[in-house]
Amino acid sequence: MRTTTLLALVLAVLLAACAAPVEPVQPAATVELPTMTPAPLATPTQATEPADTPPAESEPPSGAPAPLSDEEVVKALSDKLGVDPDQMTIVSVEPVDWPNSCLGVDTMEVMCAEVITPGYRIVVEIDGQPVEVHTNADLSVALTTEPLDLPSTAPASYDPADIYAAAIRQVYTVDHTFGQPPNFPVVYLVRKTDDSVGASGSPANGQTIAPADQERISTALADLPAELIWVNSAEEAPRDANDTVADGGAIITVGNITPQDDGTLHLPASIYIGMLAAGGQTYVLENTTNGWRITGTTGPAWIS
């Protein structure tokens, strides 16, 4: 029994000696964690109100419209009024609180809200004519206190009957060569044009006025205190022995309507009553916002 126990011990020692050595286990790396330092508690303080920022120098007081440059005014008003900017000169610009939405302008067609409306009273000169304009604060609305009567910048178009009627009326009522308005009982209108009646020596360039235009001219002049009779030539009108138009009448002859590069029209016209009572000139007509108007004459005028 003792021998068996001894053999078992020897065998155990031998088995242990033959086993592979075991490598030592490396200890795990140590990771340092950041130290968390608690933040100090915030000390309550009174809130600081922001200081008032002064307005910029260009800003107007509250409720008043901003100052305007001449360029702003010209651009806005030329667009609103349909006027060439080169025709416009600024005279004055005055901030105003208008009493209503119609900017203090009497407009019969529009109902005006009775509310104070900031804006401007602007005085401009357009082709030398003073014009007062009332606007709102941003110039999106511009109203003139009086209707404009200015040359139109639109391309010229015209009705010949209207132009001829305007010239005949001017001759009859103004340029009749008498010191006072005459009372011709009859006026003979020559239906064939003659440019020489405006300036002696000009070619006649005779053209017959269309029958429809003759009728419209007579209608437009129906308010004149005279009977209007169309004739083919001045020689057809009856005259007495002194070559004076019979029965106290007159002969009116017009030339051709000639459009000009500046948009105006030129029209010669004359009146003949007798050898010592006649005259003629060439009229200038401009297309205004109220229609074609005689605004003057051009070239030589004659009278006998």
Image (spheres, helix red, strand yellow):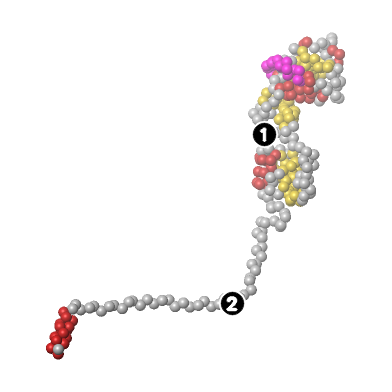
As rendered, which of 124 and 5 lies closer to the eye? Answer: 5
Q: Foreground: 284 or 30? A: 30
Alpha-carbon neighbours of circle 2 within 10 Å: few (<14), some, or many (≥20)? few
Percent of width and height locating residue 5? 16, 87
Whole-angstrom CA distance, mark 2 to mark 1, is: 75 Å
**Which amino acid type corresponds to the residue marked 2 in the rendered image?**
Thr
Q: Residue at the location (69% across, 22% down)?
A: 257
The reply to whether residue 93 is visible in this rendering is no
**The C terminus lies in which quarter of the figure?**
top right
What residue lies at 14% left-to-right and 89% top-to-bottom? 1
Range drawn in magenta: 200-217
Q: Residues within 10 Å of mark 1 (few under 14, many from 20)?
A: some
> If you read the primary sequence from the N terminus, does the residue marked by circle 2 or circle 1 appear first?
2
Q: Mark 2 = which residue?
A: 43
Q: State left or right for residue 140 relative to residue 219.
A: left
Tell me the SS state at disc 1.
loop
